[in-house]
């Protein structure tokens, strides 16, 4: 009987050990799953992972917030010729104004739009500065594409990047992506640029 008793006692000890090991492992697995779920929720909230779906199953497009309209005056265009990659045309920026819900001021002269005509399209690279009505100078680099033809007649879209002083109230311009829809018929034969922030 002593042998059987000892065996049963050892068996119970082993069973308790295995049970405790299983419980501990399950707790660790559940804890890890909870952490991953929490991380996923926070990531979705902060970074927009898993965009809401539309009825057709496609992701919902990002929202846009209107920022500003620039009225830019232009000088006489000239060309530096074909450089092997395309034909470069320079369009001087001579001034202008801009105004939006939270920003307004003037477009400074001295910049230019450096367009490269290649494969039936013009690659836009406009580089210039603007100055707000409270005296803050902001650098602008606006890249885009102009392509004639197609169903819409002409495709002309740009993506401006702003460089504002980090200690100014316009520092938020450094931290966002922007889209721009240019239009012709501005003052003095210039161009208008409507800009939206991607939310």
Image: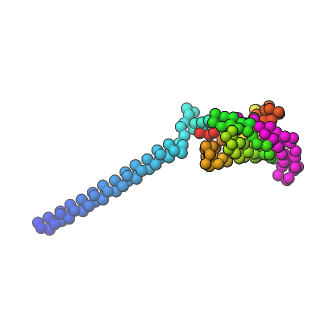
Residue 112 % position (x, y): 80, 45
Q: Nearer the viewer, residue 109 or 118?
A: 109
Q: Position of residue 36 (x, y in %)?
A: 44, 50
Picture quadrant of residue 138: top right
User: On the image, which quarter does residue 4 sit in?
Assistant: bottom left
Q: In the drawing, does residue 17 fall left or right of residue 62?
A: left
Viewer-proximal residue among 79 and 102: 102
Residue 89 inside the magenta-drawn segment = yes
Does the magenta run of residues contain 146? no
Residue occupying the point 34% across, 53% down: 27
Picture quarter with the C terminus: top right
Q: Which residues are magenta?
A: 68-96
* Residue at 17% over, 62% down: 8
Residue 120 appears in view:
no
Whole-percent x, y for residue 86 in the image = 83, 49
SS assignment for the magenta stretch, majority = strand
Q: Residue at x 37, y 52 (%)?
A: 31
């Amino acid at each position: 009987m002593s042998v059987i008793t000892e065996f049963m006692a050892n068996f119970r000890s082993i069973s308790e050990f295995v049970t405790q090991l299983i419980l501990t492992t399950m707790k660790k697995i559940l804890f890890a799953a909870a952490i991953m779920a929490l991380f996923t929720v926070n990531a979705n909230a902060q970074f927009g992972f898993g965009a809401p779906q539309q009825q057709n199953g496609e992701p919902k497009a990002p929202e846009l917030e209107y920022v500003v309209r620039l009225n830019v005056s232009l000088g006489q265009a000239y060309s530096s010729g074909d450089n092997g990659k395309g034909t470069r045309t320079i369009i001087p920026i001579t001034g202008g104004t801009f105004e939006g819900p939270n920003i307004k001021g003037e477009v400074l002269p001295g910049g230019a739009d450096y367009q490269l005509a290649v494969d039936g399209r013009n690659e836009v690279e406009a580089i210039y500065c603007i100055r707000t009505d409270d005296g803050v100078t902001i650098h602008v680099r606006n890249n885009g594409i102009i392509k004639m033809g197609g169903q819409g007649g002409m495709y002309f879209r740009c993506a401006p990047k702003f460089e504002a002083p980090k200690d100014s109230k316009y520092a938020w311009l450094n931290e966002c992506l922007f889209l721009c829809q240019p239009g012709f018929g501005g003052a003095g034969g210039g161009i208008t640029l409507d800009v939206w922030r991607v939310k």
